[in-house]
Image: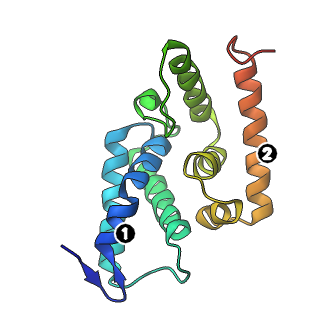
Amino acid sequence: MTVEHGDWDFSRLVEEYFSRAVRFCARMLGNVTDGEEVAQQAFVSLYEKGRKPWEKGDPLPYLYRVLRNACVDHVRRRKVRKATGSLEAVQTQADLSGAEEGEIREALLGAIGELEEGQREVVLLRFFEGLSLSETAESVGKTVGATAMLLTRAKAKLKETLGKLPEFGD
């Protein structure tokens, strides 16, 4: 069933991007259940707008901005200060296998979870969701320079945090 909504195909948007939206929200919020709930609410909000809300052909930067805002709103409502907990339950895009790779994945996700919110957002968008630097900047509502600085600081923090672990040490 195709849901034509104004000048855009809503069902195609859901089909192409919903699983990515859930993954992003789950990583932002620290658990899959909240990620699914927030992603669903964001898509309902998009549908209720009744028109294609982005100007350019690619909806990803706009969609990630909506998802980011929905995650921030969710955190504010729940008065959760920092995403913690079941990050290990969120599956990464890479299919890792073996005990050692599982430990590395767990350490990486834990380190990402410890980043400041803004840094965590840009890392997830840029490296897990594959957005370009300019798309990431547009998604978080910052300049490309500010976004690049957040990424630089996040990578330095990750290097510092992960460098202390035997798996990542020199």
Measured along the vertical axis of the image, is residue 111 above or below residue 33? above
Query: Whole-percent x and y of residue 140?
Result: 61, 61
Q: Residue at x 61, y 58 (%)?
A: 131
Query: Splitting the image into 4 quarters, where does residue 5 fall?
Result: bottom left
Q: Is 96 located above or below residue 134 in the figure?
A: above
Residue type at mark 2?
Answer: Thr
What's the CA distance linking mark 2 and mark 1? 32 Å
Secondary element type, mark 1: helix
Residue 119: horizontal and vertical position, in percent? 67, 46
- Image quarter (top left, top right, bottom left or bottom right) of the C terminus: top right
Q: Earlier in the sequence, mark 2 or mark 1?
A: 1
> Which quadrant does the N terminus fall into?
bottom left
Camera-near label (2 vs 1) is 1
The percent coordinates of residue 143 (x first, y second) are: 74, 66
Look at mark 2 in the image and give the residue it sits on. Answer: 152
Q: Residue furthest left?
A: 1
Q: Amino acid at mark 1?
A: Leu
Residue position for label 1: 13
Label 1: few (<14), some (14–19) or many (≥20) C-alpha neighbours in 10 Å: some
Please state the horizontal and vertical placement of residue 97, each as a whole percent of the image: 47, 22
What secondary structure is marked by label 2?
helix
